[in-house]
Image (spheres, helix red, strand yellow):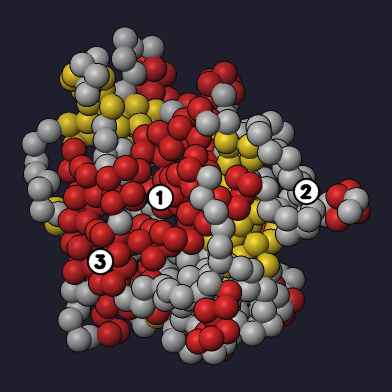
Amino acid sequence: MDSKAYDYGVHYKPSSVSNKALTLDQLKQSNISYVRVQVLDYTNTVRCRILSVPYFLAMLDSTRPGMGISKAVLGAVFHTLAEGFSSSGEYLCVPDLSSLRICPYSPKHAAVMAWLQEKTPYPSADNKLTVDVQLCPRAILQRIVRRANASGVSFLVGFESEFILLKSTRPVEAVQEHYPMDTKALLAGSIEEKLLEEISDGIQASGIELQLYHAEAAPGQFEVVTGPLTPLEAADALVHTREIILHTAAKHGLRATFAPRINTSAPGSSAHVHISVHSQRAIKTAEALSSPESSFLASLLTNLPAVTALTMPIPVSYQRMVDGIWSGGTYVSWGTENREAPIRLTNATSPSSRNFEIRCVDATANPYIALAGILGLGLDGIEKGVELTMQDCPGPVPAANMTEEGRRALGITTRMPLSWEESRSKFKMNKLLTESILGPEFTETYLVVNQCLAESLNAGGEDDEANLRRLVEFY
């Protein structure tokens, strides 16, 4: 087969993608007056401090650039602290200049993501001094990327951002009714058309590749798709993209919510992750998945029920993942261009654009943590050469509509978690994920914060309207 004849789609390679961050020289020469130094916590909330540019530059010139930030930043949930967190202790918050970008919604501002480090070095396991923080979300992902690179493997990651525009949160009310990709959702001169264009302009002005945007299926729902980057850069860009969406909507008097599902009569909002696997030891062809791609998929499928605790971290997440609404369904499976499978293989016969779309992800997940889990599991499969035994389920009959015998013939034998409680249980039992990939310290802390988050989101008790309002105002 002539691979070139099947090589459709835009071609991306790790060596060709570019992270177009703002340089320090550009910052100095700009009209920017303030820099938002940001950390993303375990509830996927952006925590920031806003520094004047002169002070920011002075900090960068110091012996060890950074500023103090309470260790409670990772355990703050609404107005409470999760168990184990207190008012004592500080991390050093260290800006990563590779993530510096303008804030188009606030022209005098720029934003930068930061590492968390210990202020005082301590002996590591090999008795060398270190300042590493095992709980830092960005550092957790960075460890996986470095391990992959040492094995001759690299990944590209792209995100889809779905959100709903609300004209009110009290009561919760979307801006309009529309159909998927309906041009009437973006009528010329309408607030929706102006807003989506402003969001898209802002994303591109920030140096992030915009691929497309369109109306989605739920009332007031839209989607923005950005181009692939290496994992850490992709997560940084996603945080910035969501900030652009949120703040630009606010400028127009609207609320953008990334909540997983706010209306059971309409589809929910996802944060689909597209991942391409690249190896120095394997050439991709049109005929079949390469060995690294196959092993990546096999390991991820085996451990998929456990990783949902990271990718769908709140109880409402499981109202979105149901059968029949193109959300990925409830059976552990994969399928070529199958949107009723939690892992969709897209552009299957195009070696240069082939990727896996992970559909069981929503925007309540911290992208650094979610990617660390997904890529860590896939990488473990590549390193061990895990064999893919589950067969492709391309449709047209989704797994949920097959007979038990039909599913078994394809190797589809496991259900996805149907609840938050089940997902946490699967996560706790998966030693590969909790101990080898993420580590016991992170696992214990994450579960405690995640429990506190779920309880806080349900603070309204039996009052569904109050809980929904709390959800859309937090996410």
Q: Position of residue 274 (x, y in %)?
A: 59, 55
State if disc 3 and disc 2 touch (CB < 8 Å): no
Going from N to C along the chain, the mark reached first, 1 or 3, is: 1
Q: Is 336 or 189 nearer to us in this picture?
A: 336
Is residue 152 among the parts visible in the rendering?
yes
Cα gap from disc 2 to disc 3, whole angstroms: 39 Å
On-image quarter of the N terminus: bottom right
Q: Position of residue 424 (x, y in %)?
A: 27, 65
Q: Quadrant of residue 393?
A: bottom right
Q: Is residue 216 above or below residue 195?
A: below
Q: Is 25 or 78 nearer to us in this picture?
A: 78
Going from N to C along the chain, the mark reached first, 2 or 3, is: 2
Q: Which mark is residue 285?
A: 2
Q: Secondary structure at mark 3?
A: helix
Residue shown at 29%/84% (left/top)?
465
Q: Which residue does the numbered mark 1 point to in the structure image?
A: 373
